[in-house]
Amino acid sequence: MLDLVLTNKEGLVGDVKLKGSLGCSDHEMVEFRILRAARRAHSKLPTLDFRRADFGLFRDLLGRVPWDKAPEGRGAPDSWLIFKGHLLQAQERCIPTKRKSSKSTKRPPWMNKELLGKVKQKKEAYRGWKQGQVAWEEYRETVRAARDQVRKAKALIELNLARDVKDSKKSFYRYVSEKRRMRGKCGSPPE
């Protein structure tokens, strides 16, 4: 019997159904649907922009609080609430917020502005070909040019990393661990 389905946001999962047993195991399969609207709303949450924060003012605001007298005669939970309140007030005044956007995601290390332009050109050519505005040969040449430049850029960055591995081991191992990392994506179940 299913007791609980945990998510980090209400309304993220819907249509939860128990399916049959998983082989000879006593565990049962659970089928559910991830609702897209709830996922998109999550990306619009404001996050703290520490790059534009005024840490000098932050330090001054927290330094003005009489910490030896503020929690005097109170228990640990009340003292924590006092500290948390002062900290959040200082944070609100000194650290601005920004909205997360999917466009500011981290680009691969080999992707530069020129290459980004080529990839955009390829997407525009595909859109034009689908609408009948661009010939197949022209679209194919654009795709080949973009693919060749991406391959050359990847090979060049890997060559530079391998050449400079004795001087900067950190960047080499960061790149290798990025390649080895599993990307756990859960697709929607077939309907």
Image (cartoon, rainbow, N blue to C red):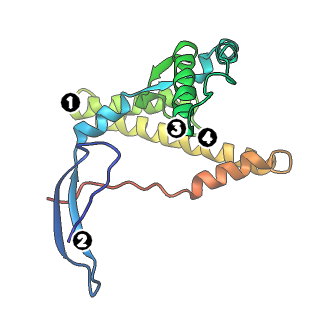
| Residue assigned mark 1 | 131
Mark 2 crowdedness (10 Å alpha carbons): few <14, some 14-19, many ≥20: few
Q: Amino acid at mark 1?
A: Gln
State the image coordinates of residue 164 (x, y, percent, origin top left).
81, 46
Query: Is residue 4 left or right of 62 when viewed as pictured?
Result: left
Q: Amino acid at mark 4?
A: Ala
2 or 4: tag closer to the N-terminus: 2
Mark 1 crowdedness (10 Å alpha carbons): few <14, some 14-19, many ≥20: few
**Comparing marks 1 and 3, which lies closer to the viewer?**
3
> Residue visible at 71% across and 52% down?
173
Q: Residue furthest front?
A: 73
SS at mark 3?
A: helix
**Comparing marks 3 and 2, which lies closer to the viewer?**
3
- Spatial CA span between label 2 and label 4: 44 Å
2 or 1: tag closer to the N-terminus: 2
**Comparing marks 2 and 1, which lies closer to the viewer?**
2
State the image coordinates of residue 127 (x, y, percent, origin top left).
28, 31
4 or 1: tag closer to the N-terminus: 1
> Residue visible at 26% across and 42% down?
10
Q: Residue furthest right?
A: 167
- Spatial CA span between label 2 and label 1: 43 Å
Mark 3 crowdedness (10 Å alpha carbons): few <14, some 14-19, many ≥20: few
- Spatial CA span between label 3 and label 2: 42 Å
3 or 4: tag closer to the N-terminus: 3
Residue 153 image label: 4
- In the rendered image of this protein, does residue 165 appear above or below residue 124? below
- Spatial CA span between label 3 and label 4: 56 Å
| Residue assigned mark 2 | 29
